[in-house]
Image: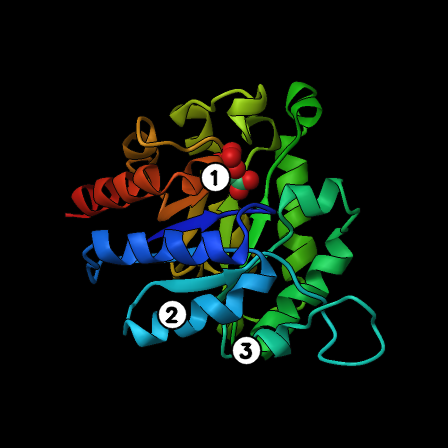
Amino acid sequence: MKTYIVGNWKMNLTVGESSIYLQKLLKRIKMSKDIEVAVAPSTIALQTLSVQLERNKSKVKLAAQNFYHRDYGAYTGEVSVMQLNGLVNYAIVGHSERRYIFGETNKDLKLKVAAAIRNNITPILCVGETENERTYGETKDVIRDEIFGALSEIDAEDVKKVIIAYEPVWAISSTKGAKIAAPDEIANTIKLIKSELKEIYGKEIAEKVPILYGGSVNPSNAGAYLTIPGVNGLLIGGSSLISDHFIDIIEIAKRVAR
Ligand code: PGA
């Protein structure tokens, strides 16, 4: 399986800044067949960046940070995943900021996962417990609800098109005071995710679903996270905004994959 390195720029960088960043990335990285690199800029930058990637014949991919589950219609202000088709290969679904700031529920996410698959875009489904849930020993139940909730209508054939990102909410944005998750603790939750997938789809199919880790990943800890058994890549927020850090993480991933 490939190693996925995905940068989530969140609500940062103008279109111009995004384009300059991408140019630097394209100049500096040598793509490898073992590593899939994707960035998730703001929606307004997707068109520009997509043209830029095409012009450079680059294998770097784009991801959407969000979308609405309906394909078209009277939904002022929304962007559908159908409209993103042709611009992105991936779409982040259920990031904790969407869940906790914008109130997205597992029911909403079920519709989004289905919409992404229907439109040939790979959903990167984020799951993870909050600090309180972790303190009260609820991690297992939360992960179970999030996986079963979002995938309940996805069959075995389609789940092979899904990527799961485990992002403990308490470990996101260490620059804003979050904790750094220890690889051991992550390993346990990854096992849990795998066993939930096995329970629904059986071992063979479950093994085909890539699982990424996200939460305060930086060039100093990326190697340790990538060597956790069952981790197939990283979803990176803050550190992906610094192009040098993101490039370092890609290089680390190449070394680990070898
Ligand atoms: P972080 O963000 O790397 O800044 O912790 C990760 C994420 O929110 O996906």
Is 22 located above or below residue 224 in the figure?
below
Type of amino acid at the residue the image marks with label 2: Gln
Q: Quadrant of residue 210?
A: bottom left
* Viewer-nearest of discs 1 and 2: 2
Q: Position of residue 183 (x, y in %)?
A: 39, 27
Disc 3 target residue = 85
Q: Which mark is residue 73?
A: none
Q: Position of residue 181 (x, y in %)?
A: 47, 24
Q: Earlier in the sequence, mark 1 or mark 2?
A: 2
Disc 2 target residue = 52
Is 131 located above or below residue 164 in the figure?
above
Q: Earlier in the sequence, mark 3 or mark 2?
A: 2
Q: Is mark 1 within 8 Å of ligand 1?
A: yes
Q: Are marks 3 and 2 in contact (CB under 8 Å)?
A: no
Type of amino acid at the residue the image marks with label 3: Asn
Disc 1 target residue = 214
Q: Position of residue 15 (x, y in %)?
A: 52, 58
